[in-house]
Image (tube, rainbow, N blue to C red):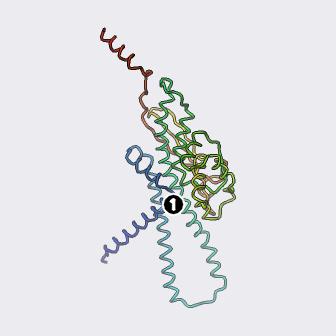
């Protein structure tokens, strides 16, 4: 039997293009330009690949599943139209309703389930990027917590908070914002919120408190995708990203290790309970998938090991060492 390689090549290219198209749509829905720019910058660092490889492969795999669903659905529709022309109408009372009830749960699971899985995969990728950004932030500020640093005045809690803000800025696009939630925030976060969203954190907190509960289960796609206006949506998503994220750093054999934990609320209709466990995070009761990652960097050298000296004092010390 002769194999038509040209047909196989065309089909392969079509399927690869379809998967890439679905992947692009998923990314465009939940990743803004600033996050994409941060991702491209992170790719210049070889150490970033160790935490991003597996989440990226997972996201591509989910995109392939979504494309397969689209392809199979299209093929079945086309085949059904062809077969309909050959069929004779036979009276079968209740057959259509029975078939509909059989296929409905499977159809909902494939659509809502794959949509939730795609968002979770995107959230895992963004958690890896958020960990990279949080790690660099902690690396910069950690040196100012050292007793020997004359600029000492930053606490470990301050460093963790700044790293948490950096992580929240990356995770914000994927956080569902249309559900009730709230948490305590710092003055540093409030300043960042004003700069990024032109809205105080207190206002964003009021907007999130006034939303509906994530449980009982959400049954509307538009709510899962966020349906509020852009100004409110950005503020609510950034605030809840901060509430759902925990960042800590510790000193170890590898240097400074930054750990990020993000509770992602599963809010797509019908099957959210499959992907997470019910708990309260950020004042919100929902089914959560916990995303974790860590990133390590070598420690900075001690900055300013001794107090800065004036030019005259430095000159006198030099003359003294020369015996003048």
The vertical placement of 255 against 309, above or below, is: below
In terms of depth relative to the viewer, which is nearer, 211 or 82? 211
In terms of depth relative to the viewer, which is nearer, 260 or 177? 177
Quadrant of the image containing the C terminus: top left
What percent of the width, then of the height, locates residue 301?
41, 29
Please tell me in which quadrant of the rendered image residue 323 appears: top left
The vertical placement of 86 against 123, above or below, is: below
What percent of the width, then of the height, locates residue 270?
63, 63
Residue picked out by circle 1 = 29
The vertical placement of 48 against 15, above or below, is: above
Q: Residue at x 38, y 44 (%)?
A: 45
Whether residue 143 is visible here, answered yes or no, is yes
What percent of the width, then of the height, locates residue 64?
45, 63
Whether residue 176 is visible here, answered yes or no, is no
What percent of the width, then of the height, locates residue 247?
55, 41
Q: Residue furthest top?
A: 323
Left or right of 251: which side holds 11? left
Secondary structure under the numbered disc 1 in the rendered image: helix
Q: Residue at x 58, y 70 (%)?
A: 107
In terms of depth relative to the viewer, which is nearer, 260 or 142? 142
Q: Residues within 10 Å of mark 1 (few under 14, many from 20)?
A: few
């Amino acid at each position: 039997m002769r194999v038509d390689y040209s047909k196989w090549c065309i089909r392969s290219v079509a399927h690869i293009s379809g998967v890439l198209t679905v992947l692009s749509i998923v990314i465009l829905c939940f990743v803004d330009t600033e996050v994409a720019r941060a991702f491209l910058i992170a790719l210049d660092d070889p150490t970033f690949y160790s935490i991003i490889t597996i989440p990226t492969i997972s996201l591509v795999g989910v995109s392939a599943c979504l494309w397969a669903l689209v392809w199979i659905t299209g093929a079945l529709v086309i085949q059904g139209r062809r077969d309909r022309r050959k069929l004779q109408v036979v009276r079968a009372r209740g057959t259509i309703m029975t078939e509909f009830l059989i296929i409905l749960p499977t159809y909902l699971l494939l659509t809502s389930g794959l949509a939730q899985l795609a968002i979770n995969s995107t959230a895992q990728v963004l958690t890896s990027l958020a960990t990279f950004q949080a790690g660099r932030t902690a690396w910069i500020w950690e040196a100012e917590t050292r007793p020997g640093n004359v600029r000492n005045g930053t606490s470990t809690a301050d460093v963790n908070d700044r790293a948490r803000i950096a992580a929240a800025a990356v995770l914000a696009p994927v956080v569902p914002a249309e559900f009730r939630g709230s948490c305590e925030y710092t003055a540093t976060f409030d300043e960042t919120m004003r700069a990024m969203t032109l809205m105080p954190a207190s206002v964003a907190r009021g907007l999130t408190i006034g939303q509906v509960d994530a449980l009982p289960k959400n049954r509307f796609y538009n709510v899962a995708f966020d349906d509020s206006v852009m100004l409110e949506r950005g503020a609510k998503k950034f605030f809840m990203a901060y509430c759902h994220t925990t960042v800590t750093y510790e000193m170890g054999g590898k240097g400074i290790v930054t750990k990020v934990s993000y509770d992602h609320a599963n809010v797509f209709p019908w099957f959210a309970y499959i992907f997470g466990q019910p708990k309260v995070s950020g004042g919100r009761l929902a089914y959560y998938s916990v995303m974790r990652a860590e990133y390590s960097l070598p420690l900075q050298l001690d900055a300013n090991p001794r107090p800065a000296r004036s030019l005259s004092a430095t000159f006198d010390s030099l003359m003294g060492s020369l015996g003048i």
